[in-house]
Image (cartoon, rainbow, N blue to C red):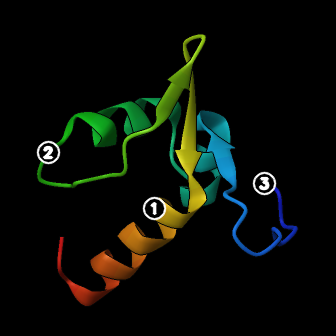
Amino acid sequence: MNQEHSERGKTEFLTGPQVAERYKISGMTLYRWLRDPKLAFPQPMVINRRKFFNETELTAWERDRAKGVA
């Protein structure tokens, strides 16, 4: 996972495998999370069948989960 901090205003994206590593889950679990509307997991941008997740959206999702919003 890219540990470097981005420049202010620059959006960072993580690949599907990086997201799976971030949450210590398998690719199949990530697949299931993406299809579970109750979980409200951030949807990726897809380019050439590769998934790219906005890191800011992931962080907001984590915050909401910690608050018990989701």
Mark before the other along the chain sequence, 3 or 2: 3
Q: Position of residue 5 (x, y in %)?
A: 83, 72
Looking at the rendered image, the disc whose residue lies closer to the viewer, 2 or 1, is 1
Q: Position of residue 54 (x, y in %)?
A: 55, 52
Mark before the other along the chain sequence, 1 or 3: 3
Front residue of this view, candidates 36 and 55: 55
Disc 1 marks a residue whose amino acid type is Glu
Q: Position of residue 31 (x, y in %)?
A: 37, 31
Q: CA distance from mark 2 to mark 1?
A: 16 Å
Task: State the residue position of label 2.
Answer: 37
Residue at x 45% of width, y 37% of height = 44
Point out the image quarter for the N terminus: bottom right
Within 10 Å of disc 1 (Cα), the crowding (few <14, some 14-19, many 20+) is some
**Which quarter of the picture shows residue 30?**
top left
Disc 3 marks a residue whose amino acid type is Met
Task: State the residue position of label 3.
Answer: 1
Instruction: Report if the CB atoms under discs 2 and 1 are less than 8 Å apart.
Output: no
- Left/right placement of residue 37 relative to residue 28 reads left
